[in-house]
Each structure stands twice: as structure tokens, then as C-alpha cells.
Amino acid sequence: MSDKQPRNPLHGVTLERMLTELVADYGWDGLGSLIDIRCFNNDPSIKSSLKFLRKTEWARKQLETLYLEKKQG
């Protein structure tokens, strides 16, 4: 089996996994202060946040960037 994205650090990492790990590390309050979006600050849940992130590219990019920064540092 060949790896079609050898230089993509997010290859194989689901959005749900990223969100779950970030919530475990920062909590909803911490995540909401780092990425100021309503789904993290008002009655947050994994399900509602995933729904929003899947539809909103700019928010998903912010989450991916934070995830990569956490993994590298």
C-alpha cells in the first residue's frame, strides 16, 4: 500500500480525533479562548462542533493549525 500524502501531517487524522484531543488538553473554555467561535463557547459539544467545522473551512483551518502546533511543540 502506498502512502499518497507522505508530507501531509494530518493524513489519517480525523476531525473528530483532533477536536477530542484538543478538548482533552485545553477544555472547552481554553479552546474557546484560543479559537473564538460560538460552538466552542456556548453550550459546546463534540457533535455540534463537528457539524460546524465540517461546513466552515476557516474554522476548520484554525483547529488544524492549533492541532499541528500542539503536536510539534
Image (tube, rainbow, N blue to C red):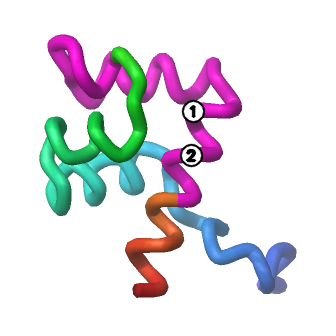
| Residue 64 place in picture, x, y as percent | 56, 54
Q: Are marks 2 and 1 in contact (CB under 8 Å)?
A: yes
Element under disc 1: helix
In this image, 50 relative to 1: left or right?
left
Q: Which residues are magenta?
A: 39-65
Q: Quick one: 60 or 7, which is closer to the camera?
A: 60
Going 39% across and 73% down the picture, which residue do you hit? 70
Going 52% across and 70% down the picture, which residue do you hit? 68
Q: Quick one: 4 or 52, which is closer to the camera?
A: 52
Tell me the kind of residue under disc 2: Gln
Going 57% across and 33% down the picture, which residue do you hit? 59
Q: Quadrant of the C terminus?
A: bottom left
Magenta stretch contains residue 63: yes
Q: Quadrant of the N terminus?
A: bottom right
Q: Which mark is residue 27?
A: none
Crowding around mark 2 (Cα neighbors within 10 Å: few <14, some 14 to 19, many 20+) is some
| Residue 10 place in picture, x, y as percent | 62, 67
| Residue 14 place in picture, x, y as percent | 50, 52
Going 28% across and 44% down the picture, which residue do you hit? 31
Q: Which residue is mark 1?
A: 59
Tell me the kind of residue under disc 1: Ala
In this image, 30 relative to 54: left or right?
left
| Residue 20 place in picture, x, y as percent | 27, 49
In the depicted structure, whether residue 44 falls above or below residue 8:
above
Q: Which residue is mark 2?
A: 62
**How many numbered circles are shown?**
2
In the depicted structure, whether residue 27 falls above or below residue 43:
below
In this image, 63 relative to 19: left or right?
right
Element under disc 2: helix
